[in-house]
Amino acid sequence: MRQRFNLDLASLERFAMLLHGNYGVGKTFLLGDMLRHEAQAGKARFLNVAGEDGALSIANLGLGEIAETVDTLADFKAVLVDYKKDGVYALAVDGGKFFGKLVIRAVCGDRLPSVGKGSDDWAKIHREFEDTLVALKQAAPVVVMASSSDRSMDQITGETSLTPDFPGRQAAGSGGQFDFVFLVKAQALSPTKVRRWVETAPTANTVIRQRLPKPLPPVIELPENGGGWAIIRKAMQECLAKGGK
């Protein structure tokens, strides 16, 4: 199929983003904040991968019955097909680490992936992982996935980096699968106050990526009670408008 498209985009209408960071930094809350904001433009859905199960952190956002849990890769793929047919506009996926486990289980069953001569387990895992992410990006115009972080070795350079907690070489290479990969951080300032922010600027030994004509602010502060996604969205739009000038 051949399809023409306009390179001079004036608004950011379709993108896929990956948020990663330690547990408890507010990734799931930012997913909920994203859905609440983007629901003004169309249907919103929250997809929880069994094992993550952190939706309680967005229980007070008034999102309603828009969430479901899947525990197999087949169900994950089926959901994406349904969402695309249903015209879902914004999709949040919680549990990148457990998504990777679904892929491994779909390929290997209950055994561990084998390595060494004659084994193609990891080739199948990586192919399945990448193909499913392609389907994920096609399921809705706005797709945001959250994942815990891990220290991983780059299979090419041998360097250790802070990456999304994905299987094998997908950890260090995950930046190529998304338009944006941001790191979410938090710092306790007092027993009752926490500072949360998103790092958007590529740094050494950390998987961060952005695809815009002009760099985003390297740090975007997240308000305590929501509204952080609107700030991120505005910054992204300002970098795109008129070539970022």
Image (cartoon, helix red, strand yellow):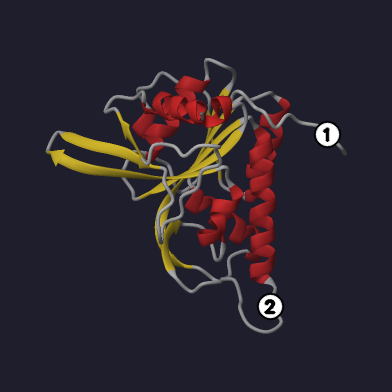
Q: Mark 1 belongs to which amino acid? A: Gln
Instruction: Say what secondary structure mark 1 lies in.
Output: loop
* Residue 75 makes an appearance in the image: no
- Where is residue 143? Give x, y as percent: 57, 35
- Where is residue 239? Give x, y as percent: 50, 31
- Where is residue 47? Give x, y as percent: 54, 36
Image quadrant for the N terminus? top right
In the rendered structure, find residue 100 and report the number of the disc placed on it.
Answer: none
> Which residue of the protein is positioned furthest toward the left in this rendering?
190
Relative placement, left or right, of 205 versus 188 is: right
Using the image as rendered, state which of residue 112 and residue 191 is in the foreground.
191
Seen at 37% across and 33% down, the residue is 29
Quarter where residue 16 is shown: top right
* Residue 173 makes an appearance in the image: yes
Q: Disc 2 marks which residue?
A: 119
> Which residue of the protein is positioned furthest toward the top in this rendering?
40
Quarter where residue 115 is shown: bottom right
- Where is residue 50? Give x, y as percent: 50, 46
Seen at 27% across and 43% down, the residue is 186
Q: Mark 2 belongs to which amino acid? A: Ser
Quarter where residue 173 is shown: bottom right
Q: Disc 1 marks which residue?
A: 3
